[in-house]
């Protein structure tokens, strides 16, 4: 596999790094503003700003929005845009974590059966359950979350019992096997429930339309924990780029780091998939693009991927909502238009390095 070595730090690089973080935060803020203001319903910028201020505790101002505009802003536009930023950031930082563990730029958040497990969980609920909510939360996100976690655990259990505990190749092969099995089970359910195929395929292509405040509250604790753990392991992933034996000499238990990062990245993936469906390519494209600007150090790649991933998906959702208005494209179609050519570029670059 290709090793992603961090390059040597240059004088003055810290200043450039801080400027990079500032630029990434500003880009995300600009994307959020565009995502809130642009859409099928016109929202006046001044009214939106005052309405946001009015939503703060102990502050009341006259925002001037009509009840319909206020409902569009608070109940539809805001949770959707924030959800897009959250999902994009989670998938990107999870992709960076997987690439650090497997030391391969082609690794992505769906590598270990998370996507197939989430797909099967969602398909089972859509096909066989009449329930719409549990405790106010949609049953499809809950089933997708449980399926993603189950798929990853199956792959990890199979990979660690069939080979060495630190064997990344064995883990990848186990992930492929589990994904194939779960995908076959999903196909079987789809054939048995042809009347629900349209709804199932809509979820598989990814969508942010169903994200509301309840969904965000459901996933926020998992998103916070998984992101914190991944960011905490940036330095250890840097050490592991020199190889497991060399990392052990430096006092790093590579097997333990690999297990924790895999668990955190899988939790981040399951959290994102639960509220958005399957959105491909983002976990490969964003970390690889970030690495072009920051170098290979995971202390910078992980947080920058989080910010850049959120920005990317907010803008992709904006395109999905407006490109064919009043209709709407599945967001997975938009990310595939960008991601597929980029994937080919990464593949060709990887082959040149290996040659």
Image: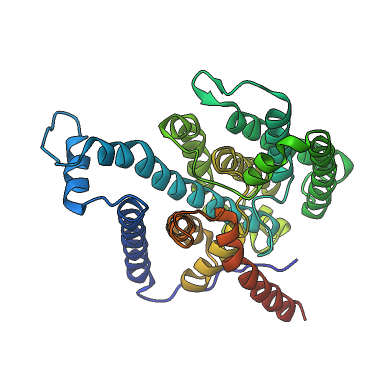
Q: How is the image coloured?
A: rainbow
Is residue 282 visible in the rendered image? The answer is yes
Please tell me which residue is depicted at 50% across the width and 45% down the height of the picture.
208
Q: Is residue 12 above or below residue 38?
A: below
Is residue 256 visible in the rendered image? The answer is no
Quarter of the picture containing the N terminus is bottom right
Q: Nearer the viewer, residue 63 or 258?
A: 63
Q: Nearer the viewer, residue 92 or 264?
A: 92
Quarter of the picture containing the C terminus is bottom right
- Where is residue 239 shown, x and y percent of the image? 60, 58
Q: Is residue 131 above or below residue 292?
A: above
The residue at the far right in this view is: 162
Q: Is residue 91 above or below residue 338?
A: above
Q: Nearer the viewer, residue 15 or 92?
A: 92
Q: Is residue 46 above or below residue 161?
A: below
Q: Give left or right: position of 229 versus 258.
A: left
Please tell me which residue is depicted at 17% across the width and 36% down the height of the picture.
54
- Where is residue 234 shown, x and y percent of the image? 53, 54
Please tell me which residue is depicted at 68% across the width and 67% down the height of the picture.
3
- Where is residue 47 shown, x and y percent of the image? 18, 47
Task: Locate residue 188: give its quadrant.
Answer: top right
Q: Give left or right: position of 251 versus 2.
A: left
Please tell me which residue is depicted at 59% across the width and 48% down the height of the picture.
206
């Amino acid at each position: 596999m290709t090793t992603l070595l961090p390059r040597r730090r240059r004088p003055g690089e810290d200043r450039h790094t801080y400027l990079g973080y500032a630029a990434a935060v500003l880009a995300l803020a600009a994307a959020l503003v565009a995502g809130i203001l642009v859409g099928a319903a016109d929202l006046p910028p001044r009214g939106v700003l005052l309405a946001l201020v009015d939503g703060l505790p102990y502050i009341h101002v006259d925002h001037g929005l009509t009840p319909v505009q206020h409902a569009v802003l608070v109940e539809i536009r805001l949770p959707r845009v924030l959800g897009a930023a959250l999902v994009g950031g989670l998938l990107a930082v999870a992709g960076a974590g997987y690439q650090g563990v497997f030391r391969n730029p082609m690794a992505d958040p769906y590598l270990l059966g998370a996507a197939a497990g989430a797909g099967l969980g969602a398909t089972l609920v859509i096909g066989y359950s009449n329930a719409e909510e549990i405790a106010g939360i949609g049953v499809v996100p809950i089933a997708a979350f449980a399926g993603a976690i189950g798929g990853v655990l199956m792959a990890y259990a199979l990979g660690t019992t069939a080979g060495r505990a630190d064997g990344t190749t064995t883990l990848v092969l186990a992930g492929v096997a589990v994904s194939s099995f779960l995908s076959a089970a999903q196909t079987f359910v789809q054939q048995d429930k042809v009347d629900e195929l349209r709804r199932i395929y809509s979820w598989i292509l990814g969508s942010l339309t169903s994200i509301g405040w309840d969904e965000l509250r459901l996933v926020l604790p998992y998103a916070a924990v998984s992101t914190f753990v991944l960011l905490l392991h940036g330095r250890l992933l840097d050490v592991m780029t020199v190889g497991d034996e060399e990392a052990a000499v430096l006092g790093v238990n590579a097997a333990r780091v690999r297990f924790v990062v895999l668990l955190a990245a899988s939790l981040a993936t399951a959290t994102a998939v639960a509220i958005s469906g399957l959105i491909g390519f983002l976990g490969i494209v964003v970390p690889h693009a970030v690495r072009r600007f920051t170098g290979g150090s995971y202390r910078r790649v992980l947080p920058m991927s989080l910010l850049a991933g959120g920005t990317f998906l907010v803008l992709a959702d904006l395109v999905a909502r407006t490109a064919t208005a009043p209709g709407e494209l599945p967001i997975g179609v938009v990310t595939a238009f960008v991601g597929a050519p980029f994937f080919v570029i990464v593949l060709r670059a990887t082959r040149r390095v290996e040659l």
